[in-house]
Image (cartoon, rainbow, N blue to C red):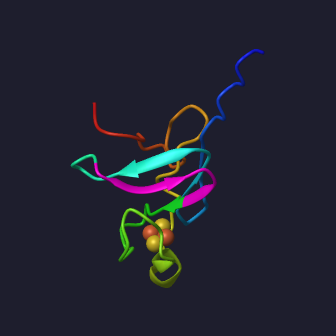
Amino acid sequence: MPDQPATPVRITLVKDGPLRVRGPVEVRDHRNRLIRESDGLLLLCRCGGSANKPFCDGTHLRIGFCDDASTPDADGDATDGAQAGPPA
Ligand code: FES
């Protein structure tokens, strides 16, 4: 019986919100201690406002987080023309 292909992990940027992570993942801290294990759905904060980092707690809605200037397009460029990602 052939091996089943691994379920791909999919990370989706939610407009003006968290990173939606679907698939089997482990979240570990800086000491490699397991924080959470999931085979389903995780929401990771990218607004910086969560009181439960790295997980989203909905604070992005209260603070009006807007990602228009930082969301990369298919080429990896930010939508406003600025460079996405860390500086070279
Ligand atoms: S993205 Fe939801 S609290 Fe930061």
Q: Is residue 2 visible?
A: yes
For the stretch drawn in magenta, what is the main secondary structure? Answer: strand
Task: Check the image and report above or below for 31 versus 57.
Answer: above
Instruction: Decide if residue 82 is on the left or right side of residue 80.
Output: left
Q: Which image quadrant for residue 55?
A: bottom left
Which percent across, then down, holds residue 8?
Answer: 64, 35
Task: Please say whether residue 55 is one of the residues in the magenta stretch.
Answer: no
The residue range painted magenta reads 33-42
Task: Check the image and report above or below for 11 versus 63.
Answer: above
| Quadrant housing the C terminus | top left
| Quadrant housing the N terminus | top right
Task: Check the image and report above or below for 27 versus 14.
Answer: above
Q: Residue at x 51, y 45 (%)?
A: 25
Q: Residue at x 47, y 69 (%)?
A: 56
Q: Is residue 64 visible?
A: no
Q: Nearer the viewer, residue 26 or 66?
A: 26
Q: Residue furthest front?
A: 1
Task: Check the image and report above or below for 67 versus 63.
Answer: above
Q: Nearer the viewer, residue 7 or 2?
A: 2
Q: Residue at x 42, y 66 (%)?
A: 47
Q: Residue furthest top?
A: 2
Instruction: Decide if residue 29 is on the left or right side of residue 41.
Output: left
Instruction: Decide if residue 38 is on the left or right side of residue 32.
Output: right
Total labels drawn: 0
Task: Please say whether residue 38 is one of the residues in the magenta stretch.
Answer: yes
Q: Nearer the viewer, residue 2 or 16?
A: 2
